[in-house]
Image: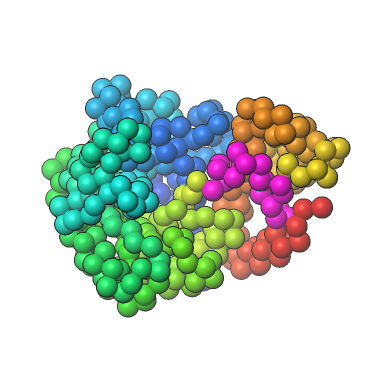
Amino acid sequence: MLSFAVTHQDGAARRGVLELPHGRVDTPQFMPVGTAGSVKAIAPDDLANIGAQIVLGNTYHLLLRPGPELVAELGGLNRFMSWPGPILTDSGGFQVYSLAEQRKITDEGALFRSHLDGSKHLLTPERAVQVQRQLGPDVLMCFDECPPARASRKEHEQAVARTTRWAARCKEEWLKDPRGDLFGIVQGGLDRELRERHAAEIAALDLPGNALGGFSVGEDPTQMWEGVAHAAPLLPAEKPRYLMGVGTPEDLLRCGMAGVDLFDCVLPTRVARNGLLFTRRGRLQIKAARYARDPRPADPGCRCYTCRTFTRAYLRHLFAAQELLAFRLNTLHNLTFYTDLMSGLRAAIEAGGARNYTERLLESFRQGPD
């Protein structure tokens, strides 16, 4: 079982330590997303050099390819992908939701067609836990239903009720062989009453940790920040709080200030492959023509290998020439930026200066790169 302790608090913001079988995670912490057992464009030693402490894998994608039986046969996901640190696996609920016309959700589970070959699969709460158990993560997630933010009140009520029933079934299956720690997921969209009700229902299951799902699925950022600020304190204070699928550097700062401990999002790696770099002065589109002769690093204050070694001019050249190295260098930079953003927030919470740290960075982001 995991152990978790909040070591410092600054307003609602928390600095904590999460001990897992494969290592320690300092919180607040961002988890790079390795959807199919790989963080796109970089290797495990890159992650270690960046300072990443935990990565995320996905049940849906690993179920379809290469299959959980093969991963288990080869020693579990840690050995399969040669990552020695902690791993959290998402249950696949969000991916099933995103399939839209290719799936049907009932109380039994989600019947869907593979995006790879069109084959049919039924993912139930029990099956989601069984697949994750075969993958062997430190943290596994309950199977949930994730409606879009602007779904009707009736749809959100149905999703909340179903997610509670599914969570109870996940717990029952997990307790048969409780390897890894199971986290519950709270839904409810932007409806405060639904969030409060569902948080109480999931907390009553007394799982090792809890997550907020259903944010950043179509609502405005300001609505999301307000929703998280209301919902995060509803989760048990003595257990880790995980905000799923969020988000931008501003999202991480604002939601970290609300008391969130763990984050994940594909954003920093996805946009890196499209030539967008996060810097202390906002977003830098490295493909822009004005960087063709720029001898400066992408972010002069950044410690990453990319910024220590290469110029904006070279990074732009790589991207324009469609060289694969562009993906790696941009990804290294963005994940280092996210890692350092969280490290800075932890230090600020310890020093009682989290609000100043956050406001200073948000103002810097608005200036834009020169």
Is residue 243 highlighted in magenta?
Answer: no
Give coordinates of residue 164: x percent, y percent: 21, 62
* Vertical side of 53 occupied by 204: above or below: below
Image-quadrant location for residue 76: top left
* Vertical side of 36 occupied by 73: above or below: above
Q: Indicate the colouring scheme.
A: rainbow
Give coordinates of residue 216: x percent, y percent: 46, 60
Image-quadrant location for residue 61: top left
Q: Is residue 95 left or right of residue 225?
A: left
State the residue in front, 242 or 357. Answer: 242
Give coordinates of residue 179: x percent, y percent: 23, 39
Q: Residue at x 66, y 45 (%)?
A: 276
Q: Residue at x 42, y 57 (%)?
A: 243
Q: Residue at x 69, y 52 (%)?
A: 283
* Vertical side of 17 occupied by 57: above or below: above
What range of the chain is rendered magenta?
267-285
